């Protein structure tokens, strides 16, 4: 049985003197009946697939609809020729989030994290860091466990699908997972991981799923950017000692309540939000013509 | 709820776990149930698969699956050309199936020398699927476990034959479901097992009276 709450995971970590990532790995090995080494190798494979996925970006490739594809390259070019408002590092994070989102729309290989639509958040946060700072691959794989463990608790208490809970459940959850993961990389204590996740989730709570023409392109690709940048700011706040006044489990429960109240037109049906804007409808008609 | 690699994963060709990865899996399971690559396939898309399938590459993923491609196969976007190279003819049409799940596909498969077959399945998200019809008989399985699918005449003794054959081979039955079109008609057994089944056990089953077809889907 996987952890039903962060509280339960904290207790396990405390009782057995474990780091959070290790508690997640042990539970995975137990649940699937595999060795710790097999579990680690599987996670290493996921990490490698993220690195490879990002490298496979093609600057000139467009999606079948023609709506997205070159955004990652544009951001790269801008970062190199001008001084981005967000600074060089965040500009790289933005660029990587866009690249993975575009890769997904262009039918290239990605790692769903937690979903295909949100596949850019975690690599934008983790891979960018890995390539800019001196940090071991082992540490990054530990961070992948942190992300997966947090995601599993969100799945157990709420949901991860836009059709169930809106974009807060996809990009929001991806952002919460990434916040906890990067917090671990920077040496955050177990409870700080929870605060980072809670703050990231709260700051995207209520986000609706309104894909134009039902495609995972507009506004999905760019929402990966907000998920990644939000994760970094939440992790920095947690590392600064700022706490979420609402415990993370209660934030997840609140997210579920908001998702349950969300109108069905705002849950991946393309019947509300920007999908139903005049331009959104026009695009949909053009594609179906 | 699944394990942590349902949260971080699957590794897949985009853009959608339900409309692309799930569609590839439907094609792949259909191919495995048919037992070989079809020479001709007719694919019907229903509901959301019909409405947004093109933009999600659902069509390319289904054909890719029929060609043996897994959801992370980089050839999926090019599957129509691969089908041409390998001589697999295909037709894709939209069709409304009453009361079907929104992400449903039905696939008719033909090849010389073996009986035609059709499979209906739907995608439930996260790249996972359920097969719900086999040649018109209602069934219900995911193909995530090692699964034995047996078509037999609906008559006494066939379930016994299968369970004896499995127990003789020291294979544990995890779940077993029985379906049939009508009394005394054609029945389907869906047996999920913990182990991988040796080929000789399958060959032995195929030779028994009243057993029409046996297919084994390995979870790997």
Image (cartoon, grey):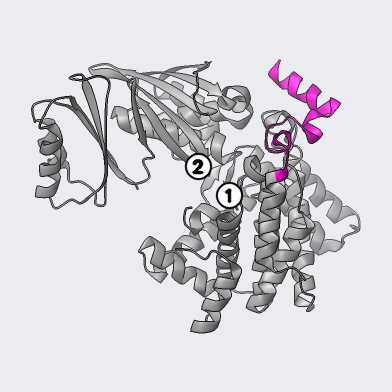
Left or right of residue A131, residue B53 in this image: left
Q: Residue at x 50, y 73 (%)?
A: A23
Q: Residue at x 76, y 65 (%)?
A: A199
Give the magenta range.
Answer: A261-289
Chain letter for the residue marked with disc 1 in the picture = A
Chain letter for the residue marked with disc 2 in the picture = B
Majority SS type along the magenta span = helix
Q: Hey, which quadrant is residue A177 in on the image?
A: bottom right
* Disc 1 residue crowd, few under 14, some 14–19, many 20+, Cα 10 Å: many
Q: Are marks 1 and 2 in contact (CB under 8 Å)?
A: yes
Q: Residue B100: horizontal and vertical position, in percent?
A: 49, 24
The residue beneath circle 1 is A112
Residue B65 lies in the magenta-colored region: no
Disc 1 versus disc 2: distance between alpha carbons?
Answer: 10 Å
Q: Is residue B80 visible?
A: yes
User: Is A103 or A256 nearer to us in this picture?
Assistant: A256
Q: Residue A193: horizontal and vertical position, in percent?
A: 67, 72
A150 w.r.t. A239: above or below:
above
SS under mark 1 = loop
The residue beneath circle 2 is B127
The disc label shown at residue A255, or none: none
Q: Residue A144: horizontal and vertical position, in percent?
A: 57, 64
Residue A274 lies in the magenta-colored region: yes
User: Is A166 or B5 nearer to us in this picture?
Assistant: A166
């Amino acid at each position: 049985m996987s952890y039903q709450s962060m509280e339960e995971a904290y207790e396990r970590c405390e009782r057995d003197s474990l780091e959070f990532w290790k508690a997640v790995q042990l539970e995975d090995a137990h649940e699937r009946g595999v060795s710790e080494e097999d579990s680690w190798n599987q996670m290493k494979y996921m990490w490698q697939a993220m690195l490879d996925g990002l490298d496979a970006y093609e600057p000139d490739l467009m999606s079948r609809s023609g709506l997205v594809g070159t955004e990652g390259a544009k951001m790269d070019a801008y970062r190199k020729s001008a001084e981005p408002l967000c600074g060089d590092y965040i500009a790289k994070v933005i660029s990587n989030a866009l690249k993975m989102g575009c890769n997904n729309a262009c039918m290239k290989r990605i790692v769903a994290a937690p979903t295909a639509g949100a596949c850019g958040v975690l690599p934008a946060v983790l891979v960018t860091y890995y390539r800019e700072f001196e940090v071991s691959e082992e540490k990054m794989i530990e961070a992948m466990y942190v992300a997966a463990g947090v995601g599993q608790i969100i799945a157990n208490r709420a949901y991860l699908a836009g059709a169930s809970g809106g974009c807060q459940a996809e990009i929001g959850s991806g952002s919460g997972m990434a916040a906890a993961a990067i917090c671990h990389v920077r040496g955050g204590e177990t409870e700080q991981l929870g605060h980072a996740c809670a703050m990231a989730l709260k700051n995207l709570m209520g986000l609706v799923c309104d894909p134009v023409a039902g495609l995972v392109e507009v506004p999905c690709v760019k929402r990966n950017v907000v998920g990644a940048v939000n994760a970094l700011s939440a992790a920095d706040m947690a590392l600064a000692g700022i706490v979420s006044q609402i415990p993370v489990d209660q934030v997840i429960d609140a997210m579920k309540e908001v998702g349950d109240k969300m109108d069905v037109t705002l849950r991946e049906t393309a019947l509300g939000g920007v999908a139903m804007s005049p331009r959104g409808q026009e695009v949909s008609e053009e594609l179906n013509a | 709820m699944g394990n942590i690699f349902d949260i971080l994963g699957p590794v897949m060709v985009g853009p959608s776990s339900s409309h692309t990865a799930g569609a590839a899996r439907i094609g792949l399971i259909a191919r495995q149930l048919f037992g070989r690559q079809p020479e001709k396939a007719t694919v019907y898309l229903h509901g959301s698969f019909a409405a947004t399938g093109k933009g999600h590459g659902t069509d390319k993923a289904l054909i890719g699956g029929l060609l043996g491609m897994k959801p992370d196969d980089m050839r999926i976007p090019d599957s129509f050309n691969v089908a041409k190279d390998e001589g697999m003819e295909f037709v894709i049409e939209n069709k409304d199936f009453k009361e079907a799940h929104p992400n449903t596909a039905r696939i008719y498969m033909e090849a010389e020398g073996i009986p035609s077959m059709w499979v209906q399945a739907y995608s439930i998200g996260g790249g996972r699927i359920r097969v719900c019809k086999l040649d018109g008989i209602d069934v219900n399985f995911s193909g995530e476990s090692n699964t034995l699918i047996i078509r037999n005449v609906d008559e006494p003794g066939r379930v016994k034959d299968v369970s004896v054959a499995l127990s003789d081979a020291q294979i544990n039955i995890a779940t077993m479901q029985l379906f049939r079109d009508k009394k005394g008609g054609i029945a389907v057994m869906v047996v999920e097992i913990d182990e991988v089944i040796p080929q000789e056990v399958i060959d032995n089953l195929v030779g028994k009276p009243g057993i029409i077809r046996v297919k084994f889907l390995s979870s790997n």
